[in-house]
Amino acid sequence: MTHRVDRRKLGLPSDQRMALLTNLQRQFIRHGYVRTTFGRAKELQRLAERLITLSKKDSLAARRAARRVLVGHSSANRPAKLLTAKSGMEATAILRQTSMMAGEDLVKYLFDEVGPRYQMRNGGYTRLTRTGLRRGDGAQTAVLELV
């Protein structure tokens, strides 16, 4: 029986599953679509819909919640090169490059572009389309895209 089961396990330990879904969310926001297996896409759909709903109300708390998902912990994303930077300008350049890779640009894009686009829509921001079977292992594949 599957009573009160909250989410899919996707055959992964919890830390790997969270990392996979975080990366899928980042790619989904960046490109507007993701091509993956059907089970992963269904789980990603839940999370992406929540992120878009969060981005519709442009508040500091909402931005911080989205940043927690799309960027992660800021101290963990700082490269070791930052500690050995010789000048302040060099450290600033490294920080700027790191924030762009880590997802600061995704938070800005989510709240400035995606959120206002769906302001008048009450859910259903994504479309999940099955695309057939994967050649290697026969897994059902799907495309998740913004409507």
Image (cartoon, rainbow, N blue to C red):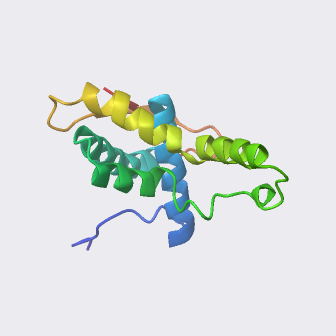
Left or right, 80 with reference to 53:
right
Q: In the image shown, does 104 or 133 lie closer to the viewer?
A: 104
Left or right, 29 with reference to 117:
right
Dividing the image into 4 quarters, which one contains the C terminus? top left
Q: Residue at x 51, y 52 (%)?
A: 71
Residue 40 in the image, given as x and y percentages of width and height: 45, 50
Q: Residue at x 48, y 39 (%)?
A: 106
Q: In the image shown, does 103 or 82 lie closer to the viewer?
A: 82
Number of dots carrying numbers: 0
Residue 56: image quadrant is top left
Q: In the image shown, does 51 or 34 lie closer to the viewer?
A: 51
Q: Can residue 142 be seen in this view?
A: no
Q: Which residue is drawn at 16% across and 31% down?
A: 121
Q: Can residue 51 be seen in this view?
A: yes
Q: In the image shown, does 121 or 119 lie closer to the viewer?
A: 119
Residue 141 in the image, given as x and y percentages of width and height: 49, 39
Q: Residue at x 30, y 50 (%)?
A: 60
Farthest residue, direction front: 88
Residue 7 in the image, given as x and y percentages of width and height: 34, 64
Dividing the image into 4 quarters, which one contains the N terminus? bottom left
Residue 123: image quadrant is top left
